[in-house]
Amino acid sequence: MLVASLAIIFGLILLIWSADRFIDGAAITAKHFGMPSLLIGIIIVGFGTSAPEIIVSTIAAINGNPGIALGNAYGSNITNIALILGLTALMRPIMVTPQVLKQELPILAIISLISAWLIYDANISRLDALILLAIFILYMLWTIRTNLTPKANAVTQNNSLPQAKMGLSQAIFWIILGLMLLVVSSQMLVWGAVNIAEYFGVSDLIIGLTIVAVGTSLPELASSLIAAKKGEHDLIVGNIIGSNLFNTLAVVGVAGVIQPMQVMPEIFSRDMLIMLLLTFSLFILGYGFRQKQGQITRAKGGLLLMIYIGYNTYLFYTVH
């Protein structure tokens, strides 16, 4: 118990520090190459901070624990939208660009529906997993090509990126080191939390959907909060969208290729349903009804946070 508690405390301190350096490195690299912040948010921050999910789900699949593998992936998606966006918006309202509403969110919604369709038969076969991975690769290629066009750069380039306080080589160094420390610190937190949960007799399903999902989403949380503090709205939104796409496609895909998995009925009827509802709610929450640019306000952030608390309360009282 003592070692697990220390792992949580030290891991949290390291997580916050490494997230700050990681965001600085990513933002300065984006400025140096003239890359849109949204692209950096999706590819580097979003996919990079999802490394803990793929590690945990892969290990769970190898060990024959599909509940933890899938609960981690879909639970992390729920956590990303309801908890992370909720907390971040409470800290500072998040601006949502028209590109996100017209392009990135529809893609996330369609991919989420495809994922739901693939697990409808209560099974993730290797063919299903390969389909998910193929979609992931195609999406990455399309996103990079689309966001690096001169027109996209002119429209989405964020002028609020910080002035370079470090050289390019130093920025790349902090991206790599920051990402490595994000993964290490999140794993320390997950290990400590899981050990404490097992000590108190919490079930594997609860661990997968809540503790592991939250633990592996801590890099996204830390990165989003730091990005909010620095006013990097596109990094926040890109982080969440990129992370959810990575979880839905790559995390489940890799785990399914390694070990085909049976999908428990409640994962589809409860967790996938909540994930889909939250994904589609972003269209309403992020739309600007009275202004050209949408905004996830503090009130909307509070609503997302209440949904997250309600979901976890329901799990606590119904899952044993």
Image (cartoon, helix red, strand yellow):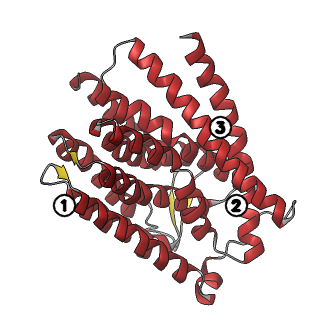
Residue at the spot 82% in from the left edge and 66% down from the top edge: 168
Q: Amino acid at mark 1?
A: Trp
Residue 31 visible in this rendered orientation of the protein: yes
287 and 276: which is toward the camera: 276
Residue at the spot 72% in from the left edge and 47% down from the top edge: 20
Q: Position of residue 107 (x, y in %)?
A: 37, 70
Q: Which residue is mark 2?
A: 26
Decide which of tag 3 and tag 1 comes sooner along the chain: 3
Vertical comparison of 147 with 261: above or below: below
Q: CA distance from mark 2 to mark 1?
A: 35 Å
Q: Residues within 10 Å of mark 2 (few under 14, many from 20)?
A: many
Q: Which mark is residue 117?
A: 1
Image quarter where the C terminus lies is top left
Q: Position of residue 62 (x, y in %)?
A: 35, 41
Callout 3–callout 2 Cβ contact below 8 Å: no
Q: Which residue is mark 3?
A: 15
129 and 174: which is toward the camera: 129
| Secondary-structure class at tag 1 | helix
Q: Which mark is residue 64?
A: none
Q: Position of residue 319 (x, y in %)?
A: 23, 26
Q: Amino acid at mark 3?
A: Leu
Callout 3–callout 1 Cβ contact below 8 Å: no
104 and 29: which is toward the camera: 29
Whether residue 10 sits left or right of residue 285 in the image: it is right
Residue at the spot 17% in from the left edge and 45% down from the top edge: 269
Q: CA distance from mark 3 to mark 2?
A: 16 Å
| Secondary-structure class at tag 2 | helix
Decide which of tag 2 and tag 1 comes sooner along the chain: 2
Question: To which quarter of the image does residue 239 belong?
Answer: bottom right
Vertical comparison of 112 with 90: above or below: below
